[in-house]
Amino acid sequence: MLDLGKPILTKHDLITSLRLMGLTAGDTVMVHSSMKAAGNVMGGPTTVMQALLDTVTPDGMVMMYVGWENIPDYTNELDDETRQLFYAHHPPFDPATARATRDHGVLVEVLRTWPNAQRSANPEASIGAVGKDAAWVTADHPLDYGYGAGSPLAKLVETGGKVLMLGAPLDTITLLHYAENIARFEPKDIIHYSCPIIRDGQTVWVDIEDYNTGDPHADYEFYQIAGDYLAAGKGSTGTVGEAQSYLFDARDLVAFAVQWLEERFGE
């Protein structure tokens, strides 16, 4: 709900700010956002989403990390009886209906339910996209190592895309998981978990292997990499609405992050 006692931000205001940040027609951009930080926006998150799409135009694309709010990736921690209950009754991941993870903000659910939105089929690393190449970027998302080769993150880099942090903290840059995947450094903790998906119309539980991305690494956090990147004079900084925001070149950020990781923790 709008606070009529505060300055009101319109879609035009947001588009103007996004263009000043360096977002242009035809861009592919992965967005992390905080609606609280964005301020008093007329129309709320729907307006923010439309402003992003209008800025990149139909020739561009908006991507977000979607994940799965109800992912049961902890069944190996349950007692046998409870685990069997999950195996028998937990709903499978359905890209068309599974709710977006809540801790990445309300705008993610807006994108997930946007007309013609596409979503990748990796339950934990699921990416949503709207725009010209949305079907391609979300297709064939590997179940194992879902932030690595062949993932939507890899395709974002391949296409020369961008990353916009619209009021979101720098430790939430999902793209840096791709840098972790391809960098040669240790340690890389490998995890295994089971997850229900739909295959040939049936619910099946599949075993998935990945690097542990659930907690900060013992020796670094993403905000340190992003902070050093900005300190090196890279990226652009500005305000979108009332939100402190940053725009990064995806390929350059990954290259910087890989070098950063290998210099400190290389094999």
Image: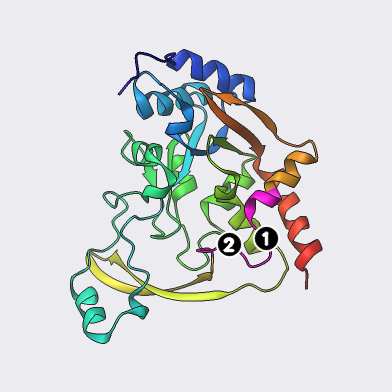
Measuring from the top left, give residue 46's x and y in whole percent. Answer: 35, 27
Relative placement, left or right, of 234 versus 195 is right
Circles 1 and 2: CB atoms closer than 8 Å: yes
Kindly identify which numbered label has been placed on residue 216.
2
* Amino acid marked by disc 2: Pro
Give the residue at x 62% y 34%. Answer: 246
Label 1, label 2: how far apart the Cα atoms are: 7 Å
- 68 in relation to 156, above or below: below
- 133 in relation to 100, above or below: above
Looking at the picture, tell me which residue is in the foreground, 257 or 77: 77
Kindly identify which numbered label has been placed on residue 220.
1
Q: What stretch is highlighted in magenta?
A: 213-225
Looking at the picture, tell me which residue is in the foreground, 89 or 118: 89
In terms of image quadrants, where is residue 22?
A: top right
- 92 in relation to 155, above or below: below
In terms of image quadrants, where is residue 68?
A: bottom left
Secondary structure under tag 1 reads: loop
- 11 in relation to 136, above or below: above
Give the residue at x 37% y 18%. Answer: 42
Residue at the extreme bottom: 80
Measuring from the top left, give residue 45's x and y in whole percent. Answer: 37, 29
Secondary structure under tag 2 reads: loop
* Amino acid marked by disc 1: Tyr
Looking at the picture, tell me which residue is in the foreground, 169 or 259: 169
Q: Quadrant of the N terminus?
A: top left
Looking at the picture, tell me which residue is in the foreground, 257 or 56: 257
Q: In which quarter of the image is the C terminus?
A: bottom right
